[in-house]
Each structure stands twice: as C-alpha cells, then as structure tokens.
C-alpha cells in the first residue's frame, strides 16, 4: 500500500502525517508513506487545498488533517 | 461521496441534540459572561489589595493591566475561535473556488474579499489555493482580493479590537480591510499581469479538481469548533501573553502622550514608517492587538496604529516567500505595493477623520 501525504509542511500537514502513521501503527500495517511537497505534483493529482491524503492513488481527504480514526477506516 | 465517520464522542453529543447541549451551552455562556464582567474589579483587587501595589504607580498600573487583559483576551479568543470554527465548517476552499469561478471582476472582487473572511485558510495553503483558482478560471484580480482579505481581515484581530477598543474601531478595521482587499484586487486585475505568473503555472496540466463533499452533522460542526479552539488557542496563547506583557510595560512605564510626538496625528511621516516597519514583521493578530491598545492609550493616532497593525498581519514575509513559487518577483512587488498603498491611505484617512 502506498500513502501520500500532500502539503508544503506546515503544522496541519505534519498533523496529517502523524495521524496516518499512528493509524498504521494501531492496525499494525505496513505501508509506504510518501510526503509530497511539490506543488506541481500535488496539483496534478487534482488537489488544490492541503493537507491531503491519497491512498493507492485515491484522494481520501483534502484541505484538512484527517483524524486517526478516519484514516483507520480508510485502511479498512 | 465520502461518509464522515462520527467518532464515539461526537455520536454521544449528536444523540443529545437538541435538548441538553443547548441548555449546557446556555449555562456555559452565562457563566462566561458573569466571569468576563467581573474581570476588571478582580484585577484591581489582585494588584492593589492582594499584592498591595500603589494605584497609579508604574508597577501597579502595569500589573493591573496584565492581570486584567490576559484573562479577558483569552476568554474572548476562546469564544470567537469556537464560533468561527463552527461557521467555517460550512465553507471549504473547494466551495469558495467553484463559487468564484463564474464571477466577473468587480462583483467577483467583492465576493472574494467577503469569502476571504470565512473560508479556512493558512498562509502555507496559499499556493495550492492559487493554483486551484487559476485552474478554475478565477480572474487574477479576484484571486488577489481573496489572498489579501484572508489574512488581513482576521477574526481574532476583529474580536480583540472589539473587546479592547470598542465596536467602532472594530467596524473601521473590518470595513477598511475589506475595502483594501476589493480595491487592491481590482487594481491588480486592471493591470493585466497574468504574464507575471510563473510559466509552469500557466502551462499547468492539472488533474481535475477533486472535491470531497462531507456530510456534517451539527455535532460534527461543534466538534470542529472545539478542535479549532484546541488548535488555535493552544498555538497563540504565548503570543497573547507576550503581547499583553509588552502592552503592560508600555501602559505602566511610557509617559502619557509620549506616543503623541512620534505616532501622533501631526507626525505625517509616522504612517509610512508604521507600514514599512510592519511589512517584515510577522506576528499573530492575537499578539499585536494588546500592543495596539497600549499605544493608543499613550496618545498614538488611531490611523497610524491601524496601519501598523494591518501591515504586520496582511503583508507577511513567510507568505511572500511561499507565493514566490507561483508568482514572479515583479508581481510580488506589485502586490506589496498596492496593498501597502491601500493601508497607507487608510492610515491617513483615519488620522484625518478622527
């Protein structure tokens, strides 16, 4: 599984990354977590507000840091 | 469509609505008001009776100012951040963008400035937002109206001005902030500077904008308000305390009317100086207002002080650095110049009128 956390690296983006990692840890799952900070790359995914979380190419949330519980639900 | 996952806590609150939370909210609000209205006597009691400082002495005045303003500002801040957090759950950047996409200039500038107040925004999300606006075909000038209003008309500053200086100053700040955003955006639109956007943005083959509609219940929205309080108040309280500390020193130790000579109405050069000093400075709105209050108390002119405050919060270096990724330096200079001139004009206007 590949999880992309998109955002330039402000507090909200870091929160998003932390929650994603916490969700993975809670479920004991392995995934490649990639931090995407390049605006061009972010825009090409159709994301225009950050932070955003993309799991296996599917954009799960834009414009806010998701909560750990939400991420866990997306992970299934 | 994305289903918003309600967690256990929100679910509980949802089950109780509309009965108990409303009553609870009302009780909290009444308690808030009672405490708020007693802050001044409490601060007098603390500084002059409990600590035993002399009323009118430098230290006594400074301590009383600090003990009065700190809880007052924190209480106002908590209430407003909560209310704005709930309001903002109704607005997303996606919704604002699609709303502005079909607008022409003029009406678009007005809408963009107003939406700039209520749309969640932070300076690091300025670039994706800019790209999204360009991609959706929002005119450049309208985009700038939004980018100016979003930081400039700051809900925290607005409320603190209301709490510390009264509704007139708050209304002036709101009105002129919106006006500057509208006019400056309109001017930038008229200048036809589309060519001064970085090439890669103009050639951007972006994916289709992904919009995730969330179904939010009232419980979710109230929860968002609570999150905003934890998030924002947790982050800015130190600025507030520092700001009030500086304000307290000015209040207690700077002689009466001292500021009148350097920041008064007659010092014509003080307005441009205030704007220039304010541009590289970057402070949280919550930290700057207590300083503003203290400066005004010592005879600084309202226009000069407002110009300083607007310059500090609207034109910030970190935002310019991040916008540099999508705008050529020429356009950034135009942006700073147009907004700076708007603030300058506002400063002189208030010094003249009031």
Image (spheres, rainbow, N blue to C red):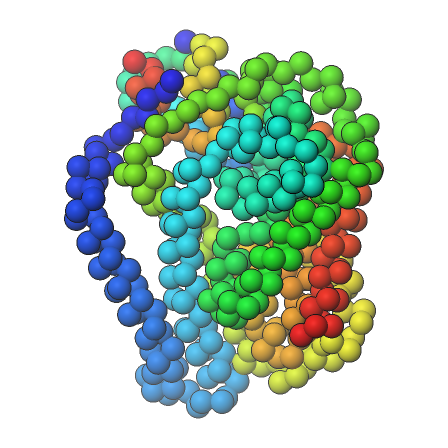
Q: Which percent across, then down, holds residue B253?
A: 58, 81
At 73% from the left and 66% from the top, the residue drawn is: B349
Q: Foreground: B175 or A71?
A: B175
Q: Foreground: B320 or B141?
A: B141
At 33% from the left and 78% from the top, the residue drawn is: B42
Tell whether B267 sits left or right of B139.
right
Q: Which percent across, then down, holds residue B137?
A: 66, 25
- Can you say whether B129 is above or below B302 in the image? above
- Residue B231 seen: no
At 54% from the left and 80% from the top, the residue drawn is: B252
Q: Foreground: A30 or A2?
A: A2
Q: Which percent across, then down, holds residue B21?
A: 21, 48
Give the quadrant of the C terminus of chain B: bottom right
The quarter of the picture where residue A47 lies is top right
Give the quadrant of the N terminus of chain B: top left
Tell whether B347 sits left or right of A29.
right
- Residue B166 seen: yes
């Amino acid at each position: 599984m590949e999880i992309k956390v998109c955002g330039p690296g402000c507090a909200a983006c870091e929160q998003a990354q932390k929650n994603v990692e916490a969700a993975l840890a809670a479920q004991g799952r392995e995934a490649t977590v990639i931090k995407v900070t390049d605006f061009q790359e972010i825009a090409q995914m159709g994301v225009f507000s950050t932070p955003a979380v993309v799991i296996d190419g599917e954009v799960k949330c834009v414009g806010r840091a998701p909560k750990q519980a939400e991420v866990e639900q997306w992970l299934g | 469509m994305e289903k918003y996952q309600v967690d256990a806590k929100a679910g509980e609150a949802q089950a109780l609505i509309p009965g108990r939370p409303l009553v609870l909210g009302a009780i909290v609000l009444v308690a808030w008001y009672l405490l708020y209205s007693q802050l001044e006597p409490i601060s007098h009691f603390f500084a002059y009776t409990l600590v035993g400082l002399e009323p009118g002495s430098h230290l006594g005045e400074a301590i009383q100012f600090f003990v009065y303003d700190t809880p007052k500002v924190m209480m106002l801040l908590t209430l407003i951040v909560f209310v704005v957090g709930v309001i903002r759950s109704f607005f997303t950047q996606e919704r604002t963008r699609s709303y502005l996409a079909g607008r022409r200039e003029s009406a678009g500038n007005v809408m963009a400035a107003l939406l700039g107040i209520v749309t969640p925004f932070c300076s690091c999300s300025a670039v994706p937002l800019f790209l999204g606006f360009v991609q959706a075909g929002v005119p450049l000038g309208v985009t700038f109206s939004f980018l100016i209003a979003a930081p400039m008309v700051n809900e925290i500053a607005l409320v603190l001005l209301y709490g510390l200086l009264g509704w007139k100053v708050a209304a002036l700040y709101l009105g002129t902030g919106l006006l500057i955003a509208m006019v400056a955006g309109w001017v930038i639109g008229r200048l036809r500077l589309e060519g001064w956007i970085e090439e890669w943005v103009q050639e951007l083959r972006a994916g289709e904008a992904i919009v995730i509609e969330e179904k939010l219940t009232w419980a979710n929205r109230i929860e968002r308000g609570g999150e905003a309080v934890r998030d924002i108040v947790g982050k800015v309280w130190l600025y507030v305390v520092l700001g009030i500390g500086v304000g307290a020193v000015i209040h207690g130790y700077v002689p009466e009317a001292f500021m009148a000579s350097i920041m008064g109405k007659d010092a014509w050069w003080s307005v441009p100086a205030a704007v220039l000093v304010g541009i590289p400075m970057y402070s949280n709105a919550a930290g700057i207002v207590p300083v503003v209050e203290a400066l005004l108390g010592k005879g600084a002119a309202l226009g000069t002080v407002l110009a300083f405050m607007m310059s500090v919060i609207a034109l910030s270096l970190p935002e310019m650095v991040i916008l540099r990724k999508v705008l050529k330096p020429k356009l950034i200079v135009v942006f700073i110049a147009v907004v700076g001139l708007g603030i300058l004009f506002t400063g002189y206007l208030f010094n003249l009128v009031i």
